[in-house]
Image (cartoon, helix red, strand yellow):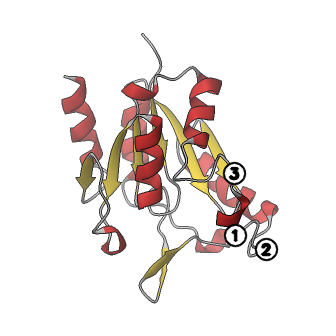
Amino acid sequence: MSKRAIFLDRDGVINRVIMKEGKPYSPRKLSDCRLTDGINDVLLRLKEDGFILIVVTNQPDISRGLIRWDELNSIHDLIRSELPIDDIIVCPHDNDDNCACRKPKPGMIVESARKWGIDIAGSFLFGDTWKDMGAGEKAGCTTILLDAPYNQDVKSNHRIKNISEALEIIIKKES
């Protein structure tokens, strides 16, 4: 049986976004990082079901000079200590860098699949933006959009109100 993964966006899925003037922003300090309610229970269940859990996150604030690597790494250390995450892949680039990793390009997913021996078609991407859904779709996995006021026009394979609803979708797809 080939390995399957759950690819998770970080901000808005793993941790809460910081809302400013109706727009979501990433936490830039460890003290601002708050994990999403229920995320640990969901990830533990998925881990028990044999999924590899990989965070794929755009962090353009690195290249914009708004957060340093050491602060970003401290946020990721918190996530690793609290959640059963197998890997965290970061794209530090900005839109104009034209890299292969920045979502909506599928580079982080494809690279992770190669590294971990993952069957992308049997895998899922959880996200909260059109960039997440675009990366998941281009890579070839099932996309699950976590509903938020800022993503009402975003298309995905599934839309959920809270993270625990993702389990129902995955269980149905497996049976």
Residue at (48%, 55%) from the top-left corner? 14
* Residue under label 2: 65
Residue 123 is situated, as x and y percent measured from the top left of the image, at: 40, 31
Compared with 145, 173 (above or below) is above
Q: Is residue 29 above or below residue 135?
A: below
Query: The C terminus is located in which quarter?
Result: top left
Q: Amino acid at mark 2?
A: Gly
C-alpha span from label 2 to label 1: 6 Å
Query: Is 97 left, or right, of 147 in this rendering?
Result: right
Q: CA distance from mark 1 to mark 3?
A: 15 Å
Label 1: state its secondary structure: loop
Q: Name the secondary structure under disc 2.
A: loop
Instruction: Give the residue type at disc 1.
Output: Asp
Q: Residues within 10 Å of mark 2 (few under 14, many from 20)?
A: few
Of the residues shown, which amino acid type is indicated by label 3? Cys
> Where does the N terminus fall, quadrant-wise?
top left
Q: Is residue 58 left or right of residue 118?
A: right
For marks 2 and 3, give the CA distance.
18 Å
Front tag of 1 and 3: 3
Q: Quadrant of residue 72?
A: bottom right
Q: Are marks 2 and 1 in contact (CB under 8 Å)?
A: yes
Question: Residue placed at 53% from the left, 46% from the top?
Answer: 83
Question: Image height check: is 48 above or below 64?
Answer: above
Q: Nearer the viewer, mark 2 or mark 3?
A: 3
* Sooner in the amino-acid sequence: mark 2 or mark 3: 2
**Mark 1 and 3 residues: CB-CB less than 8 Å, in contact?**
no
Residue 61: image tag: 1
Badge 3 crowding class, 10 Å Cα cut-off, few under 14, some 14 to 19, many 20 or more, is: some
Answer with the quarter of the image where residue 97 lies.
bottom right
Q: Residues within 10 Å of mark 1 (few under 14, many from 20)?
A: some
Q: Can you tell which mark lies on residue 99?
A: 3
